Amino acid sequence: MSNFALGSYMPMDSVVHKMDPRSKIIIMLLLMISIFIPSGITGYICIGIFICFVLFLSKLSIKYAFRSMKPMLFMMIFLLVINVLVIKTGIPWIQWGWFSIYSDAIYQTLYIVVRLLYMIIITTILTATTKPLDLTLGIEKLLKPLEKIKFPAHIIAMMISIALRFIPTLIEETQRIMNAQASRGVDLDNGSLKEKLMAILSLIVPLFISAFDRADQLANAMEARGYNPNAQRTRYKVLKMSSLDYIGLISSGFLLILNIAICFVL
């Protein structure tokens, strides 16, 4: 099993796996909107309960969902440091000479971290419970009305699906290159700032080369199979909404309205 959850499909027999990909995408978008509504702690608790319930229905463990947060830890620590240094409002919690930590700096960081956490878990649930081809078809069907204004719905849907599919692959490739560099004596953790930058550069260059090589191989494979994004396509699988999908849409819509109401009350 991959050490990185985001973008990996987990074949299971759950309620969420059986849902229509269109409804799951719409539910994800409604939850994303709810997350960015400033509804305070009460709103975030409601969203958290909803996400935990969806995790339970999808038979995915919380540990699996949290694995997607590993690459974000450095960014969260960096964000905390920046907020501590910049935000000087609220109640001073720690004062030591010129250095001080104010309550608003911690609160702002927590709000951003919780939002990021929720968004990554929601995206992880979507990709873990939806096959890449179903996800492509769902996005394409949702964007279908835009084709009347010459919007390339199928091409955009395919690009999004391939991008999500290659996230875990690129993470594994990065780990492989890091291990190869470490075996050659490259130290990414210690040394001066210049040495660390050179070590990171030695990681980025082969990663980009590998990514372009994989993209070229994929393009050649699709071309060899006669792929034409502008051709009329037939589908083996026909998407059909069920009562589960409508219950999920109504529930997520109610959660959005609830967060808007809490925002106005506060």
Image: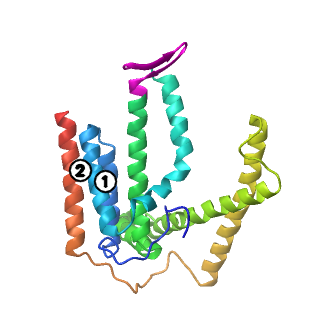
Q: Residue at x 50, y 23 (%)?
A: 86
| The image quarter in which residue 15 lies | bottom left
Residue 123 lies, in percent from the top left, at 42, 59
Q: Nearer the viewer, residue 66 or 34?
A: 66
Q: Which mark is residue 256?
A: 2
Q: Is residue 144 visible?
A: yes
- How packed mark 1 is, by other alpha carbons closer than 10 Å (few <14, some 14-19, many 20 or more), is many
Q: Are marks 1 and 2 in contact (CB under 8 Å)?
A: yes
Task: Identify the coloring.
Answer: rainbow
Q: Residue at x 68, y 74 (%)?
A: 217
Q: What residue does disc 1 label?
A: 31
Apparent side of residue 96 relative to residue 109 in the rendered image (left or right): right
Quadrant of the rendered structure where residue 56 is? bottom left
Answer with mark 1 or mark 2, whichever residue precedes in sequence.
1
- The kind of residue tagged 2 is Leu
Q: Which residues are magenta?
A: 89-105
- Residue at position x 53%, y 31% from top? 81
Q: CA distance from mark 1 to mark 2?
A: 7 Å
- Amino acid carrying label 1: it is Leu
Q: Is residue 29 above or below residue 157?
A: above
Q: How many marks?
A: 2
Asked if 120 appears above or below 146 in the picture, the reply is: above
Which disc is residue 114 wearing? none
SS label for mark 2: helix
Please give left or right for residue 190 compared with residue 139 in the image.
Answer: right
